[in-house]
Amino acid sequence: MYNYAIIGFGGLGKLHLSNLVKIEKERGDIKLQAICGADKQSFKENVKINLGTVDLSEIDIDNCNFYQDYKEMIDNEKIDFILSTLPTFLHKEVCIYALKKGIHVFSEKPFALTIDDCIEMIETAKQNEKKLMIGHCLRFDSAFSKLKEYVDNKTFGKVYRAEFTRYSQLPKWTWNNWVLDPLKSGGAILDLHIHDVDIINWIFGAPKSIYCTMTNNKAKQESVFAQFYYDDLLIISNADWSMTQTFPFEAKCLVNFEEATIVIKEGKLFVYKDGESFVESFENENCFMNEIRAFLELVIDNKPCDKTSPESVLESMKIAMRELDAAKSGERIVL
Ligand SMILES: NC(=O)c1ccc[n+]([C@@H]2O[C@H](COP(=O)([O-])OP(=O)(O)OC[C@H]3O[C@@H](n4cnc5c(N)ncnc54)[C@H](O)[C@@H]3O)[C@@H](O)[C@H]2O)c1
């Protein structure tokens, strides 16, 4: 039996647990040993995030142990792997503490707040021979895997242009409002837009140069408008979390190939060709469930993960950090 713990039991901690209890029934070889969070009275409460409400009413957490101090939990419990779903400014310290104690780590995106921190996390995992996965759930979304296949195989010819957009209501639901402080979250670039940067890097690689602007009206670093220049391809990527509270979360990707225009939105991939078009639906898939399954296969079944690695996520982080530099300089900068 492999014992696991969740550290940081807010929106994402609860979302992952809701999937893990289902996987627990399928596999039969994992067990929730402990939960660590800053705010014990909220442990059993449902939680609302921009993707909807996580319902805990059917989940029994009474058989696990509760902690408020992650070091106390790690030192006292027999734990094989943790899910770290903490505010971003805590990702590095908790990850390194756990890896050094011989525990495998799944750590939510974004990787960390600096490139040096990401590298230290990768090195610590290697030195301690433990697995580290960064939770970029979109790599486990079949619509994006399909798009990658189309681009890699040149199914519809060359790609001329692509556009990735991601818009959310102002995130007011996090613990002590940590996400609205760019020093704790990295602002909309590292928290929201990083999803698209990681997919762009995964599918198209790093751009040659970047132009980027940000706005600061309702919150600091609330939006990012970026242009990624390649030799013969332009990608535009906008993310903004300054929408009103009734605005429904929206994410869309458009890729214009020589012979088709592809749109991904709301779990569907639309292929528009001259004379014919078709839709592939992945609405019933759950990319969060897919990524946790892949993490368990990596840790327990020793099956390498072909969709992501900490090193490839580090490359995405480097692009995002250069966007910050470009936004500060107001100039188009070379990577
Ligand atoms: N993959 C995705 O699509 C996605 C979506 C949202 C958030 N995230 C990421 O997940 C992480 C968590 O975000 P969230 O929205 O769940 O935040 P949240 O504020 O809802 O939850 C964080 C939790 O951590 C707890 N916490 C704070 N300090 C702690 C400490 N020292 N020890 C233990 N617990 C502590 C808080 O009590 C809170 O419950 C962030 O890095 C965020 O970027 C990923």
Image (spheres, rainbow, N blue to C red):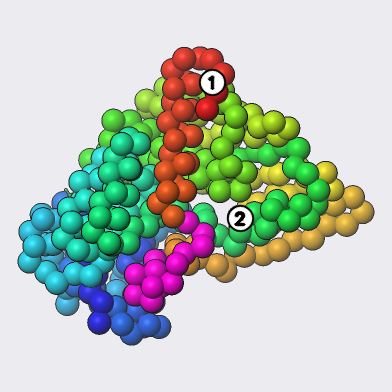
- For label 1, the crowd category at 10 Å Cα-Cα, with few meaning under 14, some 14 to 19 and many 20 or more, is some
The dot on residue 333 is 1
Can residue 230 be seen in the rendering of this structure?
A: yes
Which residue of the protein is positioned furthest toward the top in this rendering? 330
The dot on residue 225 is none
Instruction: Identify the residue shown where x is 57% and y is 69%.
Output: 284
State the image quarter where residue 89 is shown. top left
Q: Nearer the viewer, mark 2 or mark 1?
A: 1
- For label 2, the crowd category at 10 Å Cα-Cα, with few meaning under 14, some 14 to 19 and many 20 or more, is many
Instruction: Identify the residue shown where x is 61% and y is 55%.
Output: 144
Residue 7 magenta-highlighted:
no
Q: Tell me the element at label 2.
A: helix
In the rendered view, would you say 315 is above or below 222?
A: below
Magenta stretch, residue numbers? 292-308
Sequence order check: which comes first, mark 2 or mark 1? 2
Instruction: Identify the residue shown where x is 58% and y is 42%.
Output: 205
Q: Which residue is under mark 2?
A: 144
Can residue 217 be seen in the rendering of this structure?
A: no
Which residue of the protein is positioned furthest toward the right in this rendering? 275
Task: Where is residue 131? Give x, y as percent.
Answer: 32, 62
User: Which amino acid type is shown beneath numbered disc 1?
Assistant: Ile
Instruction: Identify the residue shown where x is 41% and y is 27%.
Output: 221
Q: Is 222 positioned to the left or the right of 64 in the image?
A: right
Task: Where is residue 5? Give x, y as percent.
Answer: 22, 66
| CB-based contact (under 8 Å), mark 2 and mark 1 | no
Beta carbon of the mark 2 residue lies under 8 A of ligand 1: no
Q: Residue 44 versus residue 99: which sits nearer the camera?
A: 99
